[in-house]
Structure formats: structure tokens, C-alpha cells
Image: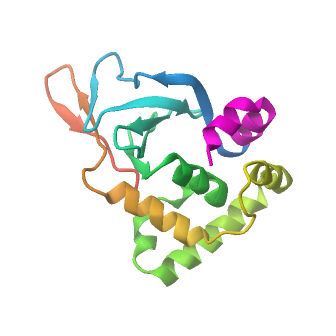
Amino acid sequence: MDYLKLLCEDSNLAADFDMLFDFCLLDGLEERDTAEGRCTFSLPGKAFARDGAGGEYHQLEDGSIGYMSSEGECGRIAESVDDLIHLFVYSICWHDYCDASQYTDISTLEAYANERHDEIASYTEMDVWETVVQALGMPLEANVAAELQKFYDAAHRAPLYICYFHEDDGTVTESQNLFF
């Protein structure tokens, strides 16, 4: 399904989606924020959305999705726009699922996913969430651990999506990975 088209065509849906997932579509593809030319990236891409903190979502040349936070973290987070939307919808707050130590085996990941999801759902407007999910034509139930495993796998797939910061003194610093 063309989720981005649905969001572009329905401003109320887009507003609810942004409120829930901190994801605001740009009017079109744009050049990525390069901090006035001081940042270069390991893979070509264009910005297509931002979050409220200044992070950017990038459509990479292979169709995968990269993310660059305002704090300098960078990485691939999904293999496609569909995977990205599924990650948003079923994790609700993907940033809260970046503890790499929880991805060691399926039982650990399932326990982590369920615990984090229950906590996040406790302060999320779930009635709005349900309306958004239905408007997107997605099922209300999903295997959160499976969505998170796709997220983790995308973030660790070669070639890695990296941002390089070019300092005034000529040194280059590699961005932090999204998983800690």
C-alpha cells in the first residue's frame, strides 16, 4: 500500500500520524541536511520527512530508509517505506527499542518488545492510534518482535548507512550507530 500517498492526501490522518509517531512528511524529496556542507553520507539519498527534534528520514538509493538524528546518530532503520510505517505503527516509538543487548535471541526480544510496548501504550492515545491504523488499512494486531527484528536487521545490513562529520581541523568523525 502507498502509505505516504495516504498521508499526503489526508491532512487529518497526517496530523494524527505526526502526533503519534513524530513524523512529518516534507512537500517532496529534498537534499539532506549536511550541516552547511560538513556532513557526508556513505550512501546517496534524499530527505522525505523530519521529526520534531530535527531528525531526518532519508530515502536511500536502494529504496531502504535511513535516519539521522539531531544528536548525530545515523543508520538504516527499514528496508522500505512499508517496513518503516509498520515499525512506527507497531512499535509506536521506535527510538525506545534501540538496546542491542535485547536482540540476542527471539525470547529475549519478545519479552523486551512486550514490556516496552505495554509501557509506551500506557501513555499513548490508543484510540487515535486505532483510528490511524484502520485508516492505513493495517491490522490492529501484529508481532512487535518480528517488526523489531526487521528494524535491527536493516540497521546492521551492509553497507551500513553512516554520516561523516568533517571538523574544522580536518578530522572526520563517524556518526554513532542508532543501536547502543
Residue at 20% x, 19% y is 168
As for residue 18 lying within the magenta part, the answer is yes
In the displayed structure, would residue 82 be above or below residue 148?
above
**Residue 155: percent from the left, percent from the top?**
38, 55
Viewer-nearest residue: 131 or 108: 131
- Which residue does the image show at 25% across and 55% down from the upper left? 158
Magenta segment:
1-19
Residue 145 location in percent, x, y?
55, 71
Quick one: which residue is furthest to the left in this view? 170
Q: Position of residue 62 (x, y in %)?
A: 35, 43
* Vertical position of residue 147 compared to residue 110: above or below: above
Which residue is outermost to the front?
Answer: 1
Q: Is residue 55 above or below residue 102?
A: above
Using residue 100 as the reference point, say whether residue 167 is left or right of it.
left
Q: Is residue 34 left or right of residue 113?
A: left
Residue 180 visible at all: no
Q: Is residue 161 left or right of residue 80?
A: left
